[in-house]
C-alpha cells in the first residue's frame, strides 16, 4: 500500500532535509532475514531495513525505498509474518535506538545496536544521549552458525571488542552533529556521510559497510568518545547553562605507553578538542544568546616513545626516529590551522631542567621543530610558542600559578577571539541558517501495539528544535590554544581550566551576565567550573593513562588536607603504573579492533602474536610498521634556545601584548615564562633515581617492591590516562606469557585488581 502524492512529496522533502532522522527502532527476525523498523519523532514516517541472514560471510543490506505510515508498516509486518509462517514466522527481538555498526573477525558478521539510552543534555533543543546498554547479534541464522566452526581466535576477538565499554564516555545525538563544534555547526553545510568521516566519530569503521551500501545515515548513530557535561549555574542571580565537551580523536588513538607523539600522517596521540558553550537559560521559542570557545590538547608532535616497563615506573623518553625536516610535525600544525585557523598558540608545560634528562630532551627538540617550521612562514602566521615549566619553583601557591596562567589565557583569548551570537526564532526562510527542520511531536503519550507485544513509550517534542533560527552574529573564534605536557593529562588539565575560567568571564560578559570580563578565582562560579574541569580531567586520564588525574592544584585551592592529597596522589600513581604495565597492551588491542586499525584475516598473524613494538602503528590485516628505535639528542641545547625573557615580552602578535608592551615579540617567536612555577600538580623537582636493585633484570616484582618504588615517587605525578574500557582479564586472553601473567596477578589481591580496572576507591 502506498501513500498519496501529497504525502509522498512531504516525505521526500523531509528525507532530503538535514533534519530528517530516525531515532527509535524495532528489530525482528525470520529464518532468512533481520528486519529493522524505524520511525521519526513525529511517528509520521516509517522505514524498513532488511539484513540477509543466509549469506554466512558477506554483509548484504537492503533498505525499502518506500516510506510508510504506521498502519501501512504494521500491515507490511503482518504480510512478512504470514509469508514466513512455515519457518517460524516473524519474531520480535528487541527495541533499539540506533545501529552502532557491523564487524567481522574470522567468522560471520555481527551487528551492534543500542538497546537502552539516557539523555544527558540538550543543545538548542537537540537531545544528546549516552548509551546505557548495547547488544551484539551474529547475522547468520542459528542453523548456519551451528555449521560454522567457532575458533578460539574468534572468541578472543569478540572478547576484545567487548572490552570497549560503550556505556562509558560515549555520547551521540540524532539531530545535532555533536562531532563538530557549535561554531562549525552554524557555518558548515556538511551532512550525512561526510560527518562520519571526521576525526571524532569513533564508529566510522563499524558503519562503513552499511553506509557504502545505503549511502545514507538514517539507521546509524555517530559515537563521540570523551566527555560531556551540562549543568545550570547561577551568577548575579541569573541562571545560565554551561556545556563542556571533550572530543577524543580516533586517529592514532590508544593507551599511554603504546601511543605517544606523532605518526607519519601528522596525527598525535591523545588529541582532544575541548569546547565550552554557554547558553542563556530562556524558554524554548525565545531568542537565546550563545557563546562558545574551543581549545585543544595533544601529545608533543615528534616521533618519541617510552618503553613499557614493569620494573621502572618512569621509563626513559626516547626520540625514536629522526625527522630532519619535521615533516610529520608540520603536517600536524597544518591540520590544526585547517581545523581552527590562525593563530595556533602552543602552551608547552614540560620541564626546563632535570637531574637526568627526560622531558628536557623533548623540550629542546620541540623548540627545534617550531623554529624550523616558522622559518618558512610569514610572520603573521607563525606558530606562537610558550614554554612554561610548572616545576621550576615548587613552592609557589596554586592560586598564584592559576593567576599567572590566567594572564596568558587573557592574551591568547584576545588573539583567537571566541564565538558569540544570538539565535532568533523566525519563519522567514530566505534568511535562515537552519540547524534543523524537524517537526515536533505534540501527541503526548503513545501506546503502540504491534504484532507481538505492547510497548508504552513517552514521546514529547521538547527535544526538537522548533523551526529554524536567524543567526545574529557578534564574534567568531579564529585560531586555537594548544596545551601539552608530557601526557596531556594532569598539568594540561590545569592549564585548560585556567583558560576556561578566563573564557567563561568573557562569555558571560558578552551575554550580559556580568559587567566586567573577570571572575574571581575564589568565587563559587569558579569552583563550580573547577569541579567540572576536574571531572573531565579524571575521565580523560582514565581513558588514556588508566587512573584519575593528579589534581594537586585543585586540591590545594579547595583547602584539602595535604596528607589526604598526598595519599590520593600516591594511590593514583600506583593505579596508573599497574594499568600501564599490565593492562595497556590488551586495551590497545581492543581499540585497534574497534577502530578497524587491525582487521583479522585467515592465514595472517593474530593481533596478539604481534610483538610489543608493533603496537605503535598497527596496519590492516596484521601487517605493521615498526618505528626506528635509535636514540638521538637534539642538536641545539636547551640553554641556547631558552634564554630568559621578561613578562613584558609579547605573546606573538604585534597588536596583542603582555601588560601593554610596545615591543614586538622576538623573531624566534619563543616565549619562556620562567616566572611561572609549580603548583605541586606537576610535582617537585625530580629526585627519584633508579637503584641498581630496581634496574636489575633478576629482581622479582612484588606488591611490596611496587609500593616501595612508588613511595619514592610520592611527590611525582605521572601525567596520563587510559580508555574507558572494560578490563576484565580472561584466561589466555592477554598479550604476554600466560604463565607469567598468572604469577603476576597472584601477587595482587582481587580487590586491588578490581580497583585498578574500575577506578573506584580502594581500601586495603
Image (cartoon, rainbow, N blue to C red):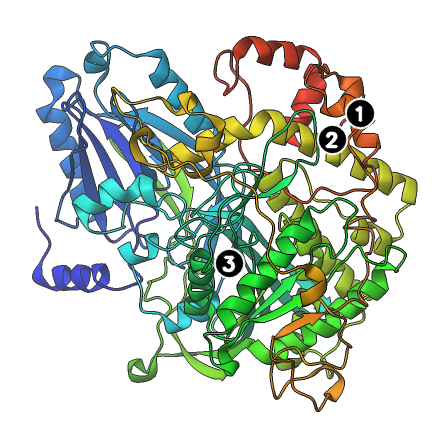
Pick the front one: 718 or 672: 672
Quadrant of the image containing the C terminus: top right
Question: At x 70% / y 29%, what residue is drawn?
Answer: 312
Q: Secondary structure at mark 3?
A: strand
Q: Secondary structure at mark 1?
A: helix
Residue 411, position in %: x, y? 67, 78
Left or right position of 690 against 369: right
- Residue behind mark 3: 122
Pick the front one: 230 or 157: 157
| Mark 3 residue crowding within 10 angstroms, few (<14) / some (14–19) / many (20+) | some
Q: Is residue 648 above or below residue 305?
A: below
Q: CA distance from mark 3 to mark 2?
A: 38 Å
State yes or no: discs 2 and 1 in contact (Cβ < 8 Å): yes
Residue 548 in sight here: yes
Residue 38: numbered disc: none
Q: Is residue 471 above or below residue 49?
A: below
- Residue behind mark 2: 574
Residue 82, position in %: x, y? 11, 25
Q: CA distance from mark 2 to mark 1?
A: 8 Å
- Residue behind mark 1: 707
Amino acid at each position: 500500500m502506498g501513500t498519496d502524492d501529497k504525502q509522498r512529496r512531504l516525505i521526500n522533502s523531509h528525507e532530503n532535509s538535514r533534519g530528517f532522522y530516525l531515532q527509535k527502532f524495532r528489530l525482528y527476525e525470520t529464518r532468512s532475514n533481520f528486519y529493522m523498523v524505524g520511525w521519526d519523532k513525529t511517528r509520521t514516517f516509517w522505514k524498513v531495513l532488511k539484513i540477509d541472514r543466509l549469506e554466512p560471510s558477506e554483509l548484504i543490506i537492503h533498505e525499502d525505498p518506500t516510506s510508510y505510515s504506521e498502519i501501512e508498516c504494521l500491515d507490511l509486518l503482518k504480510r512478512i509474518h504470514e509469508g514466513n509462517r512455515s519457518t517460524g514466522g516473524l519474531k520480535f527481538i528487541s527495541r533499539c535506538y540506533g545501529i552502532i555498526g557491523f564487524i567481522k573477525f574470522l567468522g560471520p558478521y555481527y551487528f551492534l545496536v543500542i538497546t537502552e539510552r539516557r539523555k544527558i543534555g540538550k543543545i538548542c533543543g537537540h537531545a544528546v544521549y549516552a548509551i546505557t546498554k548495547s547488544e551484539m547479534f551474529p547475522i547468520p541464522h542459528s542453523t548456519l552458525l551451528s555449521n560454522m566452526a567457532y575458533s578460539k581466535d574468534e572468541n578472543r576477538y569478540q572478547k576484545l571488542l567487548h572490552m570497549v565499554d560503550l556505556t562509558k564516555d560515549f555520547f551521540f545525538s540524532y539531530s545535532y552533529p555533536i562531532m563538530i563544534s557549535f561554531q562549525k555547526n552554524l557555518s558548515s553545510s556538511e551532512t550525512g556521510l561526510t560527518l562520519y568521516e571526521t576525526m571524532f566519530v569513533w564508529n566510522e569503521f563499524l558503519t562503513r559497510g552499511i553506509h557504502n551500501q545505503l549511502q545514507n545515515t538514517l539507521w546509524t548513530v555517530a559515537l563521540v568518545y570523551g566527555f560531556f557535561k551540562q549543568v545550570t549555574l547561577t551568577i548575579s542571580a541569573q541562571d545560565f547553562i554551561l556545556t563542556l565537551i571533550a572530543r577524543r580523536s580516533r586517529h592514532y588513538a590508544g593507551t599511554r605507553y603504546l601511543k605517544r607523539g606523532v605518526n607519519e600522517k601528522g596525527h598525535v596521540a591523545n588529541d582532544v578538542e575541548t569546547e565550552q558553550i554557554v547558553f542563556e537559560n530562556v524558554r524554548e521559542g525565545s531568542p537565546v544568546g550563545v557563546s562558545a570557545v574551543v581549545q585543544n590538547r595533544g601529545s608533543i608532535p615528534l616521533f618519541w616513545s617510552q618503553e613499557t616497563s614493569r620494573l621502572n615506573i618512569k621509563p626513559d623518553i626516547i626520540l625514536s626516529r629522526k625527522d630532519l625536516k619535521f615533516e610529520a610535525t608540520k603536517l600536524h600544525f597544518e591540520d590544526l590551522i585547517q581545523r581552527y585557523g590562525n593563530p595556533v598558540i602552543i602552551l608547552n608545560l614540560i620541564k626546563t631542567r632535570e637531574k637526568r634528562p627526560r622531558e628536557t630532551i623533548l623540550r629542546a627538540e620541540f623548540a627545534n621543530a617550531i623554529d624550523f617550521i616558522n622559518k618558512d612562514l610569514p610572520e603573521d602566521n607563525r606558530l606562537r610558542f610558550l614554554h612554561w615549566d610548572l616545576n621550576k619553583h615548587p613552592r609557589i601557591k596554586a592560586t598564584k600559578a592559576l593567576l599567572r596562567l590566567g594572564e596568558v589565557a587573557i592574551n591568547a583569548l584576545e588573539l583567537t577571539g571566541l564565538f558569540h551570537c544570538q539565535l532568533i526564532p523566525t519563519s522567514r526562510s530566505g534568511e535562515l541558517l537552519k540547524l534543523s527542520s524537524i517537526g515536533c511531536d505534540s501527541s503526548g503519550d503513545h501506546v503502540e501495539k504491534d504484532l507481538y507485544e505492547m510497548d508504552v513509550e513517552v514521546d514529547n517534542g521538547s527535544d526538537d528544535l522548533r523551526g529554524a533560527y536567524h543567526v545574529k552574529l557578534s564574534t567568531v573564534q579564529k585560531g586555537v590554544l594548544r596545551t601539552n605536557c608530557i601526557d596531556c593529562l594532569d598539568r594540561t588539565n590545569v592549564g585548560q581550566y585556567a583558560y576556561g575560567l578566563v573564557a567563561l568571564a568573557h562569555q558571560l560578559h558578552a551575554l550580559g551576565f556580568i559587567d566586567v570580563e573577570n571572575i574571581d578565582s575564589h568565587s563559587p562560579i569558579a569552583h563550580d567550573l573547577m569541579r567540572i574541569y576536574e571531572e573531565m580531567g579524571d575521565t580523560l586520564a582514565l581513558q588514556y593513562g588508566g587512573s584519575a588525574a593528579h589534581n594537586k592544584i585543585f586540591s590545594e585551592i579547595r583547602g584539602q588536607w595535604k596528607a589526604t592529597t598526598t595519599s590520593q596522589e600516591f594511590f593514583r600513581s600506583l593505579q596508573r603504573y599497574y594499568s600501564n604495565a599490565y593492562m595497556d597492551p590488551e586495551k590497545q588491542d581492543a581499540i585497534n579492533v574497534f577502530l578497524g586499525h587491525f582487521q583479522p584475516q585467515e592465514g595472517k598473524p593474530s593481533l596478539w602474536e604481534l610483538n610489543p613494538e608493533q603496537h605503535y602503528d598497527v596496519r590492516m590485516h596484521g601487517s605493521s610498521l615498526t618505528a626506528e628505535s635509535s636514540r638521538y639528542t637534539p642538536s641545539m641545547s636547551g640553554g641556547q634556545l631558552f634564554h630568559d625573557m621578561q613578562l613584558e615580552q609579547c605573546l606573538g602578535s604585534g597588536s596583542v601584548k603582555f601588560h601593554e608592551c610596545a615591543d614586538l615579540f622576538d623573531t624566534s617567536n619563543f616565549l619562556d615564562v620562567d616566572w611561572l612555577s609549580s603548583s605541586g600538580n606537576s610535582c617537585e623537582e625530580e629526585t627519584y633515581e633508579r637503584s641498581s636493585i630496581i634496574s636489575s633484570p633478576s629482581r622479582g616484582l612484588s606488591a611490596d617492591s611496587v609500593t616501595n618504588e612508588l613511595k619514592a615517587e610520592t611527590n611525582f605525578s605521572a601525567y596520563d590516562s587510559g580508555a574507558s574500557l572494560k578490563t576484565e582479564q580472561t584466561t589466555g586472553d592477554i598479550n604476554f606469557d600466560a604463565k607469567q601473567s598468572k604469577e603476576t596477578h597472584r601477587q595482587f589481591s582481587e580487590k586491588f585488581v578490581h580497583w585498578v580496572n574500575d577506578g573506584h576507591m580502594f581500601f586495603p
